[in-house]
């Protein structure tokens, strides 16, 4: 693969955009056209992230300039609302767009409005987008013009539950997801919530029940695997570490099955998937830190008719920019793992 | 209250014993007779815990010496098995015993053997002990000769679920407990699991399902509130902080109830309990760190028939030595909060 | 001591003010007149710090209201500049003022202007204030109307170096201070510097050399012990923990002395000081966490003519509100340790 | 470069050995002959480090077996003493040896015995070895049969001080090194010192003065740059993070020089060095985490005649296995940065 694709990254001054750029620097098939960061336009990326000193002298530009310079591939690491403001123009220019915001994850304008409390400004694209979870939508990603890269929590939940839902092995009304996330999931923007002193030495649940925005995305996608409406109870927790998500999921089984049978099912479903590791032992977030792996395991709880499924990912990598690059690799004909850390 | 009780602490070189001793130093009604620490007998406590320099010159003695010196009150901060080896002798001497180990928490020799894989050597005391969770057993603690102080996880679970079980508001077969603990819960003993590098920046589930030893204690005690057999799914997670437990609990409601009704029920059930705070917002472990508080809240999940109950405690304080001292205060006629941090 | 003093705390919504209030709640001789927090006026303190739920229903007021309500004792936990705006009025009302800001630490308007880049608005009070480091200025604190409570770094440095400077044992031009601080030293205000992700897993030096504002205070006070001008090299480092300062200090000895001689000198100088612990082993910040102790040790480096002095304090307690309360205890005739954590 | 070298790693079950193996897996010119781990012989590496699941099925062997299988290149990630027991045999077999232990870092048997308190068993090799700090010894490494890879602290100190010593710009008797290290520097072996609870939320100095073993290595190597005997004061501190070293160094300048002159000198000395970044701002350990970079800066302190030099490295990468691989790349004719993370 000698071809080089021209890539523009929008929102390079956040953790996701900067991490994506770091991967792109090492990707043999990527040429960087522009990096945008409105608030930091005119500054070097290495001034914002000193760890990149010596790796790049790249100066960031405004979103407008980046739209102009984008030609072939655009990654959007922007907040929701900001993304949908530029996606139509990028598509019109012929770019293939990989949107890491939430703007195109929902399938309908109504569901978007319901979960994000804002009207969608490019509703016609919602049906046209492809949902960028390669393990389930690889073929459609190959041809997609607009890929909505999944949220971090939804990625871990789908990898954990899809095999069971597809085989009708669990009651889709009994799903409980207890998720633990590192702090980078809240982004680089300042808030009391992410102040060191208040996050360190603390486990903090937030938006428990069905109030976190990712619930909409989770239920939408799980329902497709289930073939019927899925409703989840979802409790995210902020934990004192930088990176990582562990989703501990609880389900009622529809038939008596043992742990080893279910592990076999997972192994079979994910056979050939290089970024999913089905483990007989329990996943831990440290095992996937800075990698694109999703580690998954399943354990039947004796005498209860229930199973526990655990899935660990790095929220920034498989949960964001790693998965986005994986999608791009597929769409642009590179080896799927090209440039991805393992 | 001018009376002084003579207190002996067994196992003073662990986190629990040393923490208890620190509280006792400030307790106006406590005179310390002896501290035991077999491995460190002959050493000063402040040599093991330099933070206690200047506070005490106390030298630790062997368990045997401590048994001899114990007269009135004995706290046992020993591993299970070691505790039951000395409890009968202490009771014979007329001591009131507050056992922080697991040895007397189960009600029958069979259940003890089932969960701890060892035969009980003082089975006749299992029925005689009082379970030391003051919010539920205050009157019996007042007269008890042997108090089995609860485990850290079971304390948080019972405070979270007792009101609902007592009022038959939840299906006792649907309880799921997802618990997150700080590392001090694993004690001061060395293990790869508690090595800094492997615990830092990591969320690690362990013994998920029904395999953790605290499941036996949880099910035994919850069944009493429910009036029927309770079975729980229990997933503990090791998290990168020193102290704290958050138990996130999921239940099916037996009738349609709202969050505010349930909060009112909790407020009513815990009215007058100075160490239980019923919160309208979500508990976090930092809010209870180094205190004897249990913070509890409940949230009904719309359209699911389920509720989430959250309970945060400091695993070392309300989950161990604070609760033990609370029991002693009750048993010996001190103000219940005497010497306890809030 | 049955007397109650009426205390007003300005700036109660910061770490220092809230911590001071927590101590006051347990202090038998303190009655709280008012808590100020301009930005949070009208809110409960427990809404800002949920850990105080159940401990207090106190509502915070504006600075203006607090000035009106202050009668006897005022603690100022305000930023510099804000403090000097109210101190004269509080003194006029007859209050004894304990100012935890930097506004009255310098001895002259010029040195204040030089280090804080702002003109002093109450310059006549600079000479009248008493510097609130009880171990060195106890008698003057007893009578003081205005106490300038020292900065956190300067406290640790003075306790470490005063004995040596007073006895002319070190060359006052050779002092190097390498200090490591927890993140709470930067306050509760938001900044990229204190964002969890950027502080966690990081050691970050800042303002090294002679650029940190505490250098002025350190040199001013050390010069008094030395009887000549002292100049220090000072390198603060932000470290991934909530609380604590360790100052590692390097000096040239003026005469050949051994470690044990110097330890004896320290023991003699601090004999009777209940909050200074002279240790033969190395201090660590965890040993003083949440206490008012300063742990200090000294080690002569063989074959170099140099000594290393180490001093650990909790930056929020002995480095701020604990020391302030210690000063108040002295000034108001309470036992010096009343209400202080050890 | 199509050539493949056959590499054997001794001590693969420690952080250094496993990290080195991870790099080797991605190195296009490395074929792994064997991994040794006596205590874990017969086990898969991925059983000890679950993060390597899916990356390798490699089973570890005994040291004896590894010696037999080693043919071309051997990396020794063994404790000192264990390394010198096998090095002569590996050299006899014709292997090029890269020893990450301390066994061959000292130049004479006497200095080894003085610092490591044990007699050297292969003293004739001490003079024959090459000290593996490529920035200073690149040409000799090219031909070396035995490379003694430097310690982590000494690497950071030499990169920080060599330019100044070589140009006689500092007084070699005035060097003070205050170093802060992450916990992985203490290895994977269990000790109370590395127990999570006792290291978290703590800054702990240890072996201050001239007692740490790295002092011997530092003084030996710095003396070569200086052309005269150098004596340092060295204070290492354990800090609550996994990886990273920051050395803050204090020196007396021999002539009046400004910060920008010294930065220019550093830039000139390290021109062309791809793993040394000379920074105008202050280095932080997070900026070099998981990279082979050494970040260095220098700041003259006004009015003192002193300068502060700061050097940050990842103790495991540039401080250990990254530097070892860099040496191997040089010795075996690969591109110097091949396989190294930046």
Image (cartoon, coloured by chain):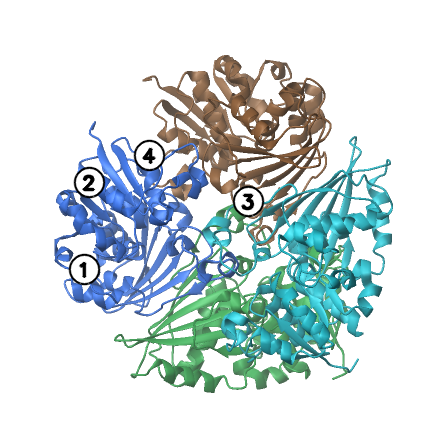
Chain colours: A green, B blue, C brown, D cyan
Give percent across and percent down for residue B160.
28, 55
Q: Is D158 in front, or is B334?
A: D158
Residue A1 in the image: above or below residue A193: below
Both on one chain, marks 2 and 4?
Answer: yes
Front of the two marks 2 and 3: 3
Callout 4: 10 Å neighbours few (<14), some, many (20+)?
some
Among the 4 quarters of the image, the one containing residue D234 = top right
Q: CA distance from mark 3 to mark 4?
A: 26 Å
Q: Nearer the viewer, residue C283 or D90?
A: D90
- Residue identifier under label 2: B330
In three-dimensional space, the C-alpha distance between marks 2 and 3, rounded to whole angstroms, equals 40 Å
Residue identifier under label 4: B25
Q: Which mark is residue B121?
A: 1
Q: Nearer the viewer, residue B16 or A64?
A: B16
- Give the residue displayed 51% in from the left and 70% down from the top: D39
Q: Quadrant of residue B186?
A: bottom left
In what quadrant of the picture does the N terminus of chain B appear? Answer: top left
If you read the primary sequence from the N terminus, does the residue marked by circle 2 or circle 4 appear first? 4
N-terminal of the pair, mark 1 or mark 2, is 1
């Amino acid at each position: 693969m000698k071809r080089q694709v021209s890539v523009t990254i929008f929102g390079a001054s956040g953790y996701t955009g900067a991490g994506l750029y770091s991967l792109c620097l090492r990707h043999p098939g990527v040429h960087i056209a522009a990096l945008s960061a409105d608030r930091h336009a005119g500054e070097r990326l290495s001034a914002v992230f000193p760890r990149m000193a010596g790796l790049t002298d790249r100066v960031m530009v405004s979103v407008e300039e980046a739209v102009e310079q984008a030609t072939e591939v655009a990654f959007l690491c922007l907040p929701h609302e900001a993304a949908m403001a530029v996606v139509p123009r990028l598509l019109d220019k012929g770019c293939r767009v990989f949107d890491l915001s939430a703007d195109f994850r929902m399938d309908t304008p109504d569901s978007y409005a319901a979960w994000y409390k804002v009207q969608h400004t490019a509703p016609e694209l919602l049906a046209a987008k492809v949902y960028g979870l390669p393990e389930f939508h690889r073929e459609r990603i190959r041809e997609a013009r607009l890929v909505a890269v999944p949220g971090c929590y939804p990625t871990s939940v789908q990898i954990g539950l899809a095999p069971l839902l597809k085989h009708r092995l669990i009651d889709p009304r009994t799903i409980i997801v207890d998720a633990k996330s590192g702090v980078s999931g809240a982004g680089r923007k300042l808030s009391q919530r992410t102040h060191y002193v208040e996050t360190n030495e603390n486990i903090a649940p937030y938006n428990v029940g069905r109030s976190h925005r990712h619930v909409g995305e989770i239920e939408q996608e799980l329902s497709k695997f289930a073939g019927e409406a899925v409703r989840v109870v979802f409790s995210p927790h902020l934990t004192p570490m930088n990176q990582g998500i562990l989703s501990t999921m609880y389900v009622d089984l529809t038939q008596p099955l043992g742990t080893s049978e279910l592990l076999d099912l997972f192994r079979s479903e994910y056979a050939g998937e290089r970024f999913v590791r089905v483990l007989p032992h329990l996943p831990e977030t440290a095992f996937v830190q800075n990698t694109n792996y999703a580690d998954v395991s399943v354990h039947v709880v004796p005498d209860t008719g229930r199973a526990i499924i655990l899935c660990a990912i790095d929220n920034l990598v498989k949960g964001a920019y790693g998965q986005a690059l994986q999608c791009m690799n597929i769409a642009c004909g590179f080896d799927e793992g090209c440039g991805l850390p393992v």
